[in-house]
Structure formats: C-alpha cells, structure tokens
Image (cartoon, rainbow, N blue to C red):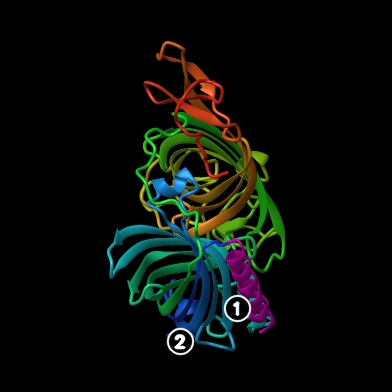
Amino acid sequence: MKKTIFFALLFIGVGQLAMAQKIPFAIKGSIYGGYIVPMTKNLDSISHPPALGGEMAIEFPAMGNYDWQHYWRMPTVGVGLLGINLGNPKLLGTAFAVYPYLLVPVVKTEHFHLNYKIGAGLSFFTKTWNDGDTLSGVNASTANSAIGSVLNVYLTTGANLEFPVAKQFSITSDIGYNHMSNGSMLQPNAGLNMLQVMVGAKYLFPGCTHCKKPRPPIDGFPYDFSINLIASGGARELYYKDNKMYPVGSFHASMSANLTDWYALGGGVDVFYDGVFVQQGNRGEGENKVEYEEHTQFGRYFIPTEDIANKFRAGVCLSNEFIIGRVTAVLQWGVYVYDPIRNATHDPHPVYGDNRPMLYSYDIEKEDGWNYFRLGVRCRVYDNLFVNASLKTHLQKAEMVEWGIGYQIPYTKKQESDGRRGSYAVYHPDRKWKRGDPNKQWQPVGVESEDPPFNLGR
C-alpha cells in the first residue's frame, strides 16, 4: 500500500512538472486481466486464473525535438505502475511492476490508433519460494518455484489500441504478453509468463506551444557502421539448496551496419565465463554409479573434473539492433563454437552419445544445447561510452544477467571540399555534425552547410 501511494504521488509530481514546462502529457488508468501460462507442473498446480489488477500510466507524446522520434513515426513514451493479484494470495501473492515503455505507431486514423508496445522495468513480489513449505523439502503443490526473489525484471510486448472519443479523451486497450523473473540470479527461477488484456481510459493534457509537426525522416544516418566492445559481469545461483552464488561474466565484440535510420544488423563473437560449472553430477546405477556432491546436488550436468577450462564458452552471434536515440535495444542469437561441457550431461545423447556435433537435436529440459540468445539494452551515457544490461538464455531458460560497460566506435565517411567522399572517420555523437552537400554525408560543424545539426537524442 505504501509503495502504491508513493508511486501515485510521484506520478502527480511528474504531471505537475510537465504542466509547468508546457509539455503535453496524458494520464491513463486501466483494469487488468491476465492468464498465467503454466510452464511448469508447479505453476499448473498453484495458479488459479484469472489474475486481476490495474495500471496507472503517464504518457508523453513525441514533440519532434529529436530525429529518432521522426524515424520511429513520432512514438509515445510512457511509464506504467502495474499491480496484479496473481490468483493465489497464499503462495503467489501480488506482483507490482514499474516500467517505461514505447508506443510505436502502426496505424493512425481519426478514430483509431494501433501501436506496437514494448517495455522493460522492475517487478516486485509479495510472495516468493521462501514463503512456501520448503523446510521439509520441495513440495510442488505447496511451494512457489516460479519466483525466487522479491525483486525481478519485468518485460512486456504487444498491441496498444486507442479509440479517440473526444479531442482530449480516449478509450484504450492493451493486448499482449509479459514475463517476470530474476534471470537465474537466485533459484528457483521458473519465472512467470502471462497473457494479458487491459481496458482503460486516457486523458491528454495539452499546452505545448512549441511542438514540431511530424516531418519525413532525415535521409542518412550519421554513421555507416560501428564496432561495439562490451565487458560484463554478474553472479548467479545454480541450485536453490546450495545457497551459493557463483561469478559470471562475458566479453562481446561485434560489428554492425546501419540498414535504416533505426535498425542495424551485424555479427560478433562472445566469450562467456560461468562459475557454476564446478565438479558436479552423477551417472550410472548401483555399483557403477559415479557421483560428485561436494559443491552441489544439482543433477542437470555431469562434470567429473574440477577444471577452470570448463567454465569458459565461446560463440559467434547474429545481432539485431534497434536504435532509439541514446538507447539501443538488442536481440542476438548465437552458436557455441567452443563448449567444453557440450557432453557434460546427466545422460548421454540418445543418438550421439558423448560425442555431440556442433548442431544436434536436444531437450532443453535436460541440457543447454548448442545455441544461445541475448536480450539487452544499451544506454549511451557520454559520447560513445554506454552502459549495458542483458539477459542470456538457452531458449526459454535464463542462464545469467549481464551488467556491463561498453564502447562504440562508429565510422562515417568524411566529406571532402570538392564534394567527394573521403576516408572513414570516427563519429562522436556528443559533438555537433552537419550534413555536407551534395552527397548528404556528415561532417563536423564549421564546414559550410545549410542543413541543421544532427541530434542523436541528446
């Protein structure tokens, strides 16, 4: 209750500040209905649909001050406060989420708006695994194995519909999906996946006297391609009974080319360190059984030796980058080229035994497999320096959360005095650049040009 009051007062304060600055904003209230997808037997036994709740949100329509807003068709930026009764007060309790989101216009008419919604933030739970009957062992029917910590991430995506019924008043609806988990930092961590529907109303407070009307995007992003270097670290648990944290980390290097003003495609290499791969596991039956339980009782892996090399993996990845001013959302898919625990499983592969090739069929419930995914966000803090937060997974199973710092080296063609494109130079976004004629290439301020300075979301 105190948290709800705090965030409500915060929303009011932000709204008053926006009114004082004559920034247009909207207040939206919605009722929430959700269905918990039973991804595990545990959730199937303890979740009792529907999950009901409500959301308050404050939204800021694009004013056209930044070029990225035009590239994304004048999107709306919002911040939501969500509360959900998960349908089982004793074991699942209530979830709260605070998250920023982006509404990207897809269809916009006088009486109907269709937007793509994507958001990421933090979620908080009143009930976790520790509130269940865990003292006498795991009881799937009376313990919450979906959530192992109070603090978790919140991810959401879907469609946002708006039906204007007056100049400043609209009926709204959101249809989509959300995910809440801690990224395997604390176990157990099956996570909550929910299908959701929201219906509400929105009121727009006008007052913007300096908004720019939408215009066509500027032709040509300020740089052609870039190199990204990221070093990350973190920690995670392997098994809830161990009560032990292990260090994790990664190094990422990639090159990407800007295909549009808001999207870049590239590839790179990854080196991962995961401290959980200590000597562990068991194989065999009876007298032939080999078992290692000094570090953990977890049975997913079988690692008979204590070797630092077991804790390193390397891969190559395909990278999709969605550029939103200072923020870049990243979705990557990778393949392991070096994986010393590829065959370190409880049971040999039914076809390949202990000699798995680089690509093979596998059961994600029994092993990690040969590929990985990464969902991340980068935020530029100064010039080409950025901070990074990402989640690495094997299909739907989270492996680690990566917190890191990175440096981007973007390259652009310099403009020669005779109009020809010259050699490549490193682009610095916190310096003002102008487009040079006649080829519309970018050059530092000081070279004669009639075009306005490029602003990359500063």
Badge 1: few (under 14), some or many (20 or more) residues near its Cα, within 10 Å?
some
Check if mark 2's residue and mark 1's residue have beta carbons within 8 Å.
no
What numbered label is drawn on residue 48? 2
The residue that label 1 is drawn on is 138
**Disc 1 residue type?**
Val
Residue closer to the observer: 340 or 164? 164
Badge count: 2
Q: Is 259 part of what is drawn in magenta?
A: no
- Estimate the x, y position of residue 166 in percent, counting from the top left: 35, 76
The answer to if 6 sits in the magenta stretch is yes
Q: Who's the residue at 71% across and 65% down the image?
A: 243
Q: Give the residue at the far top of this rendering.
A: 418
Which circle's residue, 2 or 1, is located before the other in the chain? 2
In 3D space, how far apart are the residues under numbered discs 2 and 1 (Cα atoms)? Answer: 20 Å
The magenta segment is 1-21
Quadrant that contains the C terminus: top right
Q: Quadrant of residue 184?
A: bottom right
Q: Is residue 169 above or below residue 79?
A: below
Residue 177 spot, x, y in % from top left: 41, 68
Q: Quadrant of residue 95?
A: bottom right
Rendered view: 296 above or below 278? below
